[in-house]
Image (cartoon, helix red, strand yellow):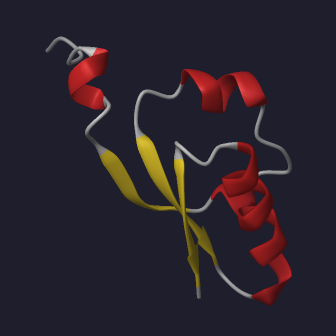
Amino acid sequence: MATPPRDILGHLVDVHCHPTEQTQIPDDLMSDLPIKVCAMASGRHDQEKVADLVRRFPDKVIPCFG
């Protein structure tokens, strides 16, 4: 199955991901990502990581604090 075109992927959102489980997320990876993500903070200890990610990529990241 072929990957959908980027203009279609631009409408998709990964509604539950935990980028805070990674030590670092490269800027080029996020810049090239064709979809948006809801970045989940699991607790107080990783909320700043999610906040930093949304500051760096406001058009790609929807912050979720829980």
* Residue at the (34%, 49%) spot, across then down: 13
Locate the N terminus by quadrant: top left
Quarter where residue 63 is shown: bottom right
* Residue at the (43%, 44%) spot, across then down: 36
Q: Is residue 12 left or right of residue 52?
A: left
Vertical order, 53 against 33 (above or below): below
Vertical order, 27 against 39 (above or below): above
User: How far from the left and from the top, in percent, is residue 12?
Assistant: 28, 42
Q: Is residue 18 left or right of residue 23?
A: left
Vertical order, 36 against 3 (above or below): below
Report the front residue among 58 and 4.
Answer: 58
Report the front residue among 58 and 66.
Answer: 58
User: How far from the left and from the top, in percent, is residue 42?
Assistant: 65, 81
Q: How many marks?
A: 0
* Residue at the (76%, 30%) spot, across then down: 27
Vertical order, 37 against 18 (above or below): above
Locate the C terminus by quadrant: bottom right
Quarter where residue 19 is shown: bottom right
* Residue at the (79%, 88%) spot, across then down: 44
User: How far from the left and from the top, in percent, is residue 2?
Assistant: 18, 11
